[in-house]
Image (spheres, rainbow, N blue to C red):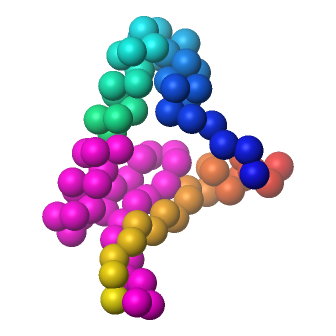
Amino acid sequence: MKMTTTEQLARQVSFLAQLTEQQANSAIQAMGSSILVEIRQGRAVELQGFGLFDMAPRKDGSNGIRFRQHNNVREALNP
């Protein structure tokens, strides 16, 4: 599987959002941290049109993050 790095994603975001790459990188990092804080506090996080992140218990008793995609994502991936 190929992987896109944060820096590569920041380049795309910077172009689409008309930000510098540094601003886009900071925004991506801040978004990840903010999502984690909300989930740790027991709240789900919805990115409209993309999906929902929430906490899910694992078989070994630890917690993980679950992602449930929005219908728009499913349709985009399966035209």
Residue 11 in the image: above or below residue 5: above
| Residue at left offset 49%, top offset 63% | 67
Q: Name the residue nearer the viewer: 8 or 45.
A: 8
Please tell me how many numbered marks the rendered image carries.
0
Residue 1 in the image: above or below residue 44: above
Residue 51 in the image: above or below residue 11: below
Where in the figure is residue 59, as x and y percent of width and height?
A: 44, 90
User: Residue lying furthest right in this view?
Assistant: 79
Where in the figure is residue 54, as x and y percent of width and height?
A: 36, 66
Q: Quadrant of residue 58?
A: bottom left
In-image side of 5 versus 61 (left or right): right
Q: Is 8 in the magenta?
A: no
Q: Name the residue nearer the viewer: 54 or 30.
A: 30
Q: Is 51 in the magenta?
A: yes
| Residue at left offset 35%, top offset 44% | 32
Residue 23 in the image: above or below residue 57: above
Q: Name the residue nearer the viewer: 7 or 39.
A: 7
Where in the figure is residue 47, as x and y percent of width and height?
A: 42, 47
| Residue at left offset 38%, top offset 53% | 46
Q: Quadrant of residue 3?
A: top right
In-image side of 40 versus 53 (left or right): left
| Residue at left offset 40%, top offset 60% | 53
Q: Name the residue nearer the viewer: 71 or 24.
A: 24
Where in the figure is residue 55, as x and y percent of width and height?
A: 34, 71
In-image side of 48 versus 15 (left or right): left
Q: Quadrant of residue 52?
A: bottom left
In-image side of 16 versus 53 (left or right): right
- Residue range in magenta is 32-60
